Image (cartoon, helix red, strand yellow):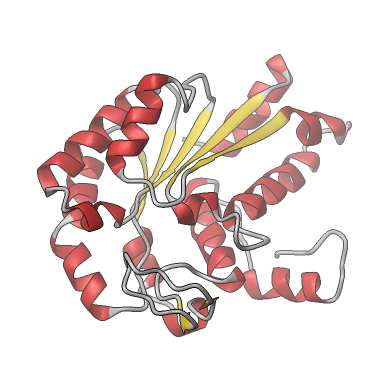
Amino acid sequence: MNLLQTIKSALESKKSFKIAFTGASITSAEWIHPNWREIIEYVLKEELTKQFDNWKIPSWYIRCFNYGFDGSTTGDIKEFVTMGTIPTDFDLVIYLLSNNDSYIKTSTDQYTLNVRETISKFSCPIIFCSGLAANNPDVNSTYQKTYYQSFLNLSSKSDLIVIDLFKETQKTDLARFYTLINVPGNKVAGIKPGEKDSAHPNRLGNAYIAKIILETAFQILFNPEKYLQDLKNDIMFPAYQ
């Protein structure tokens, strides 16, 4: 599926394309800017602007919605969709899984069921992303044996645009992504006050999440280092290629 062409065709025909981002705290990412959601929105609008004579069409009619909920589990997301807190009338959904279910000891089977029921509610294309690799070998090992297997099973049986962020982020230097100081700490996650947060990526990590999704799902090349350097230099429209 050529998603960029799909968006272009939608804009040409109805001048609207709604994208929902859903998941837990790494999806909401309201604690870091620019986050991967914001970067993807920026790049899609920039790329589509090249294909229209009128810049207002992509700028005004590509609409992105943050349906990320800090601390949420797959059960919470399923409930939000069932109750209508997360609408289902989108043109594209990007669903990023997490490891939060481990804190309430959700079984792998229940995790799979929750996710399957959630994605069944949408009739639009879904970009289906695994959780990230954390900067914690023990957490990664446990995730790989449990919920990551759910992701792999669901990916093999569903008509989804699959992005294995767990595998792809392990190809990088994770220490560069996890430098944020969690001042209050996170007792549930075992992070003490003032420690580096091993689960929530910084701006560079967010830029790499955007890179993986943009290049895999949209075939748009993205250079995180160049993009962030332009931002650092106060370039109004940062380059990314």
Quadrant housing residue 84: top left
Question: Where 231 falls versus 98 (above or below)?
Answer: below
Residue 115 at least partly seen:
yes
Residue 65 is situated, as x and y percent measured from the top left of the image, at: 60, 36
Q: Residue at x 65, y 55 (%)?
A: 39
Question: Where 2 falls versus 122 (above or below)?
Answer: below
Residue 113 is situated, as x and y percent measured from the top left of the image, at: 18, 35
Residue 17 is situated, as x and y percent measured from the top left of the image, at: 64, 26
Q: Residue at x 22, y 41 (%)?
A: 154
Q: Quadrant of the C terminus?
A: bottom right
Q: Residue at x 56, y 58 (%)?
A: 210
Residue 40 appears left or right of 119: right
Quadrant housing residue 141: bottom left
Q: Residue at x 46, y 79 (%)?
A: 193
Figure disc tally: 0
**Between 53 and 18, the one nearer to me in the picture:** 18
Residue 28 appears left or right of 229: left
Residue 162 appears left or right of 183: left
Question: Where 66 falls versus 123 (above or below)?
Answer: below
Residue 186 appears left or right of 239: left
Residue 173 at least partly seen:
no
**Between 216 and 83, the one nearer to me in the picture:** 83
